[in-house]
Image (cartoon, grey):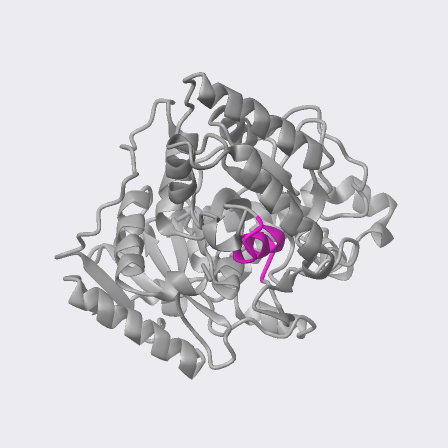
Amino acid sequence: MEADSIPKTIAQASQQMQSGLLTSKTLVKHYLEGIQKLNPTLSAFITVLDKQALGTATKLDFERSNGQERGLIHGIPVVIKDNIDTAGVKTTVGSQLFCDRIPLSDSVIVQKLKAAGAVILGKTNLSEFAADLSGNNLFYGNTCNFWNHNHSSGGSSSGSATAIAAHLCLAGIGTDTGGSIRVPASWSGVVGLRPTYGLLSNDGIFPRTRSFDTVGFLTNSVEDIAILLDAVLFPISTNFKQLYPLPTNINGLKLGIVNNYTFWGIEPEIAKAIYNAISILKKLGAEITTINSPFLIEEFDEVTYSTIALYEFHQVLQAEYATNPNKFGAKVQSDLSKGVKISHHSYKKAKQKREECFMQRQKLFQEVDILLIPTTPMVAPLIDADAKIYRLNQRFMLPFSFLGLPAISLPCGRSTQGLPIGLQLVGNSYTEALILRVAFALQVATTFSEDSLL
């Protein structure tokens, strides 16, 4: 296939396949050729499923030719982060310790994707045990930023984000504990959704921190996120109405800038891009309001977050850490060495304090429908940047993970270096439809998304 004839979104590919202009097998072959060519440089994949993907695509094409249509992701090629179990397929969690780990069954998210007709191209690279935002991995290679290979892709869902940016698939499945979907989405110039905590099942996903972990999606367009959510939420009993197609009318919606937070300590180019996006949203009819949030400015306690996160992480890996700590990379060793020192009493106190903070979810949205926040305070740093640099980029992540809120990152511009800039939209629990509506309106009104579809 000619590169310019390849559909750039799930919506486009689905339409072409339904009309007979494209087959899943043709699309899969195109992506597998791209992976073979680019992955040695990008290190986006740990495992590529050439034969399995072609076999699945052939089967799904046969179904379609016989009038069996599973929905909008029937025949759509996707990639799966390698901390998400796939039956009979190596799932390493980015660790040397699990280099030969082969699950016996699929995770719930993979079961739902397969049932809806998705074709799995492979398992994508990640920071070891999804433990940091760099996207670097000592054992499976550092995933490069597609737009500049000297810069970070963002992590921990690094491979999924880079595969999307490089047009090696149409959708990537990732996980987000403290920013692991949103950061790589921002730095890679793609769209990434962290859903409301608990909306989607984590069964069959290797835990980083059970209290904050959620599976989510990375794509090239906002409407593709809606298509994927529909595919995995239905036909189960749910309070959600079907999301796709998304409306574009945001007239009268109240969008909030947080005083001394949204624009505090961010790079000037990011501030300029966020202001521009806000200006466009205002022209589309949204009301922009500045609010005060003592929780975000003063009350959110990163120590409480870290106490929960590190204690739970150690609980998962304590046996392996006790017997062979040197099997782990430096970041994981550091986290486990801290986690082992946290008492159960301290953990319970931190959990109780978190529960007391849940009332903040309502306070944040008393005056506005959606919060407007930069995804990160800086564009992608150099791939070998100091760990302190990566920690700085959690400041717009952790409070919303802590409260279990849904958030989406979407492109809103480029730096003078050509590196992507992300805008984060945060909503109250279970307001995915509202977040996607605002994000889609902005996408339709701009060329930001087209930058990532070149």
Q: Does 248 sit above or below residue 239?
A: below
Residue 451 locus on image (x, y percent): 43, 65
User: Can residue 238 be seen at all in this image of the molecule?
Assistant: yes
Q: Residue at x 37, y 65 (%)?
A: 448
Instruction: Give x and y (percent) for residue 360.
Output: 32, 54
> Any magenta on residue 437?
no
| Region rendered in magenta | 154-168
Decide if residue 201 is on the left or right side of residue 19: right
Residue 447 horizontal/vertical position (percent): 34, 65
Residue 158 colored in magenta in the image: yes
Q: Residue at x 66, y 53 (%)?
A: 44
At 59% from the left and 74% from the top, the residue drawn is 381
Closer to the camera, 32 or 113?
Answer: 32
Between 163 and 63, the one lying in front of the other is: 63
Place residue 56 in its image quadrant: top right
Q: Is residue 239 above or below residue 209?
A: above
Which x, y percent locates residue 401?
46, 52
Q: State whether residue 30 is above or below residue 200.
A: below
Front residue of 318 and 256: 256
